[in-house]
Image (cartoon, rainbow, N blue to C red):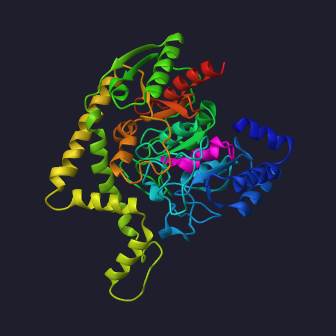
Amino acid sequence: MKIAKQIDEVAATSAVAVVRAALERAKADKNNVVINLSESRALERAAKVDAGELKGRLAGVPFVAKDNFLGYGAPTTAASKLLKSFDAPLQATVVEKLESEGAICIGKVNLDAFAHGGSTENSAYGVTRNAVDPTRVAGGSSGGSAVAVARGIVPFALGTDTGGSIRQPASFNGVVGIKPTYGAVSRYGVVAMASGTDTIGVLAHDVEDTALLMDIMTGQDTKDMTTLPDFFAVQSTPTGKKLGLIKEFMAEGIDPIVRARILAAVEQYKSLGYEVEEVSLPMLKYALAIYYIVVPAEISSNLARYDGVRYGSRVGNEGTLRDVYELSRQAGFEPENKRRIIIGSYVLSSGFFDAYYQKAQKARTLLIREFNDVLSRYDALIGPVAPSPAFKIGNNTDDPLKMYLEDVMTVPASLAGLPAVSVPIDTNDEGLPIGIQIIGKRRDDAHILAIARELEELRHG
């Protein structure tokens, strides 16, 4: 469902009718997408659109936010029991920007608790099911956002991407998902996962809608000192046509059908006049190890505030303060949250900080330099988003290492702070969607979307 179609429906009927229809679709969905709806507030805002009090490029267009975005009208839970009744006192900057253009948030959707996971199986509110095959995962951690768009509940959804949490579910459900350049979009008002790689992005029906939303969302924010001055300007055509196919992403371990679909996309790009060459980035083999040292370290720090006293639901009032902390955290965190806290605390501990965390950061610098070197010779890099299409629910839950390996193709761009977009290119023989990942230089967000749009237009005629 495109944004333009929703705008036409608002003009033909009313914003209230369009928003009410989206709310009904959300209530009727069987994939466990929605955690909480903001029904009263959404309908009030829709009435303001109809009265001419609320205008903008997205006037009357409904959307959903991943439930780690603070917003009015519904609790912000981060899909965790710890925050089950947290009513935010403010809204995320990006929600404010969208609403200033007349968009209407109808509710919050499911994710892996605190965004820790790649399948949306780690939610305190149950598993979100894949939009195409309900026996398979939606991907994660922005699984609810991806399925909400793929199922046509709303034309776009907000997500966060720390190591692939927008791109992988976008690929698994056949929608477009972008992880912007680190700092392109304000993170103010979003529950932090790992501050060094957290980015705010969007999932949408197609590249055109994605570019429009990025144009609205990007820009500097005094409330987030990591944000960059606005550099995004929608591009209709790419300024360069030299692509590098990442050799390490096409190596052993990739599903043969995924490999075949990526190679078919390469041929399509060549038919559009692109020069495509295989490129090697030897540091990529260390990227996953770097990520799962650096990110859990930041997670353990960011989650320290959730103790049942300062933040989060309290369990027990007897015993010492430490007892309250332990009981509240034990009851409130999901197993994956605890796993990452333990890993992060370990690599930051005395005696291991130099051996693990500092060494990982040095290796990360080498990875960034390698990306910069290769991208100085190519306009963008391409490859798969994930080694395979969506896997069966429960397949990887007993093997954390196997689950972490699902991130092997998305974490490198996150560690380097580069923009990357997942675009649907085909399906496998079972009809499961497969996406291609396009990675660009820092601040080349509009350019990689223009490259994606050319392939999208070729596929759709």
Residue 107, position as x, y percentages in the image? 65, 57
Q: Which residues are magenta?
A: 142-160
Quadrant occupied by the C terminus: top right
419 lies left or right of 350: right
Q: Residue at x 42, y 87 (%)?
A: 317
Residue 271, position as x, y percentages in the image? 53, 10
Total labels drawn: 0
Residue 362 image-quadrant placement: top left
Seen as rendered, the residue at the extreme left is: 351
Residue 322, position as x, y percentages in the image? 32, 80
Picture layout, residue 295 above or below residue 425: below
Q: Residue at x 51, y 16 (%)?
A: 269
Q: Is residue 329 magenta?
A: no
425 lies left or right of 11: left
Picture layout, residue 295 above or below residue 341: above
Q: Is residue 152 magenta?
A: yes
Residue 116 image-quadrant placement: bottom left
Q: Residue at x 53, y 39 (%)?
A: 172
